[in-house]
Image (cartoon, grey):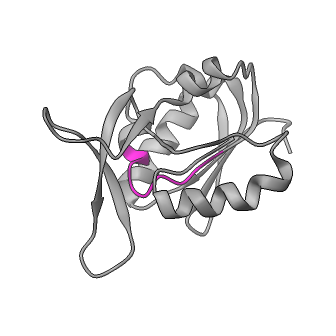
Amino acid sequence: MALEPDQENFELLSMNAEPYKERVVALRNALWWKSSALKIARAAGDNSHSMLECQEGEAPYCQGLTPFELMERYAIPQADIFKIDIEGSEEILFRQENLEWLSRCRVVVVDVHSDEAGRAVGAAARRFGYIVRRHRELLVLRRSGEL
């Protein structure tokens, strides 16, 4: 399963996943901490972007879906590897009280974009008994005995 909110990137994802369409689900959505209509906020001067919740009356760019919502919708009892690269939104995702979806993941790999995000991910990982290792900008969370 792969989520990509950006239309151009989603088209590339779909094209690249085409040979594996029986095994890959590509969704034009964003991973978010709650189910919500989202808009895109592009940073001036570069190609980076982040997602923000739409205000009343704003047209949504895409729908934000929670990890738990995805696992339930697609009947995923356990994820072997859950890779998260949500351009700075990882801090808000991992600061939530309800992170029960983490109990359904063997390994979680998070691309962290700030020290605060890294602390939020690390704290959540420890709550769920993960061993945390850093590799460059990635935090790799794994359960004892996994990988």
Side of 89 where 109 appears, left or right: right
Q: Residue at x 15, y 37 (%)?
A: 55
Front residue of 72 and 17: 17
On screen, residue 143 above or below 61: above
The quadrant of the image that shows the C terminus is top right
Percent coordinates x, y for residue 6 in the rendering: 46, 57
Q: Residue at x 48, y 29 (%)?
A: 66
Residue at the location (54% across, 22% down)? 69
**Residue 122 is covered by the magenta coloring:** no
In this picture, residue 90 sits left or right of residue 79: left
Q: Residue 101: image x %, image y %?
A: 59, 24
Q: Nearer the viewer, residue 71 or 122?
A: 71
Residue interval drawn in magenta: 83-91
- Judge from the rendering whether residue 96 lies leftward or rightward of residue 124; answer left or right: left
- Horizontal side of 130 relative to 125 (left or right) equals right
Q: Nearer the viewer, residue 2 or 128?
A: 2
Q: Position of residue 44 (x, y in %)?
A: 24, 76
Q: Is residue 31 visible?
A: yes
Q: Is residue 88 magenta?
A: yes
The image shows residue 19 at horizontal and vertical percentages of 85, 55
Which quadrant of the view contains residue 43?
A: bottom left
The N terminus is located in which quarter? top right
Residue 128 seen by the camera = no
Tally of marks: 0
Q: Nearer the viewer, residue 17 or 106?
A: 17
Residue at point 54% right, 62% down?
9
The image quarter in which residue 54 lies: top left
Residue at the bottom extreme, as displayed? 45
